[in-house]
Image: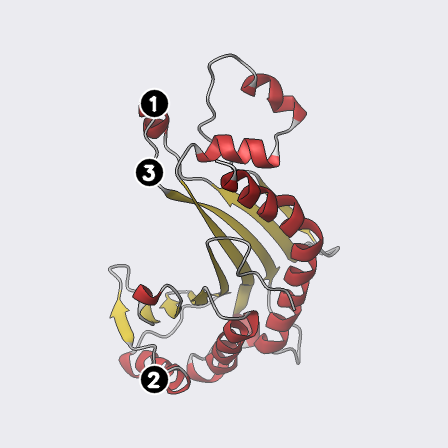
Amino acid sequence: MLDYSHLSNDYYINVNLNTEMALPAQRETVLGFFERVQKTYPTMSNFYTRESGDFVLEEDKERGHYRWISIEPRRVCTGYVNPPSVEAALAQHRLVMELIPYMLSVSPLDCEAIDYMMGFDYSYRGNHDALVAEALGTSPAFEGLLSIPGVQPINIEPSITIALDESCRLQARLLVETRTTAASVRRGEFPEEQISVYFTIRQYGSLPPGVTYEETLSQLREHSDRLLETHVIDHVLRPLAQAISTK
């Protein structure tokens, strides 16, 4: 099994289920769902409502590793930041996928899209965009712009989405997100911020008859592990870590 914990400063595994219909927001339904989750994970004791109306249950963030779950008007999200293992995160996500059809009335027909996302954060004090260009390179078509004397990059965020099947309903997306601002480049002052890499496997549409959310989650995870190992870890994650380590 792959160990992702050594590849970045922080990593996290999230699952998002987007629904076609609005999710229930009644007190009894929402609290009953979170109380059932809390029976399995008693340390998830911080419950609150965002200004947007989203409901959130999470662990204490101060420890540096924590679980969280949110219910939005048309989305259920479950995440684990810095889990001790991938299986620990998947156990949480499987529980949520198991409960939502019965406790939130989300049938497999109601699925607009389901995401399995691996996120990796790298702390870096400097020009994020220049670092990304150095670590990952740029298209030959853009190299001329970067070679102009005195220029500095202020927005280089590589992103690619590919279809994994003929119907284009199963997709993989790789995104590198930087947080350097033009003001920081202008002043030459760079606070320590995070460069984030997101790798998402998304399946669109209702689930096939007889297929559960838990089974779909397992399939998305398999695609993610395979593609990360063959195309992302050595070509994106390790080059970023190595470039940061030399600064």
- Say which element carries label 1: helix
Give the residue pinned by disc 3. 191
Badge 1 amino acid: Arg
Say above or below: 130 vs 149: below
Where is the N terminus found, in terms of image quarters? bottom right
Q: CA distance from mark 1 to mark 2?
A: 50 Å
Q: Quadrant for residue 42, please give it.
A: bottom left
Type of amino acid at the residue the image marks with label 3: Pro
- Residue type at mark 2? Glu
Q: Is residue 181 left or right of residue 174?
A: left
Instruction: Tell which tag, 2 or 3, sits nearer the viewer.
Output: 3
Q: Secondary structure at mark 2?
A: helix
The tag earlier along the polypeptide, 3 or 1, is 1
First-in-chain label (2 vs 3) = 2
Give the labeled residue for mark 1: 186
Q: Residues within 10 Å of mark 2 (few under 14, many from 20)?
A: some
Residues 130 and 97: in front is: 130
Q: CA distance from mark 2 to mark 3?
A: 40 Å
Local packing at callout 1 (Cα closer than 10 Å; few below 14, some 14-19, many 20+) is few
**Is residue 93 positioned above or below 231 on the image?**
below
Q: Is residue 156 visible?
A: no
User: Which residue has dot 2 on it?
Assistant: 35
Say if 154 sits above or below 66 in the image: above
Residue 8 visible? The answer is: yes
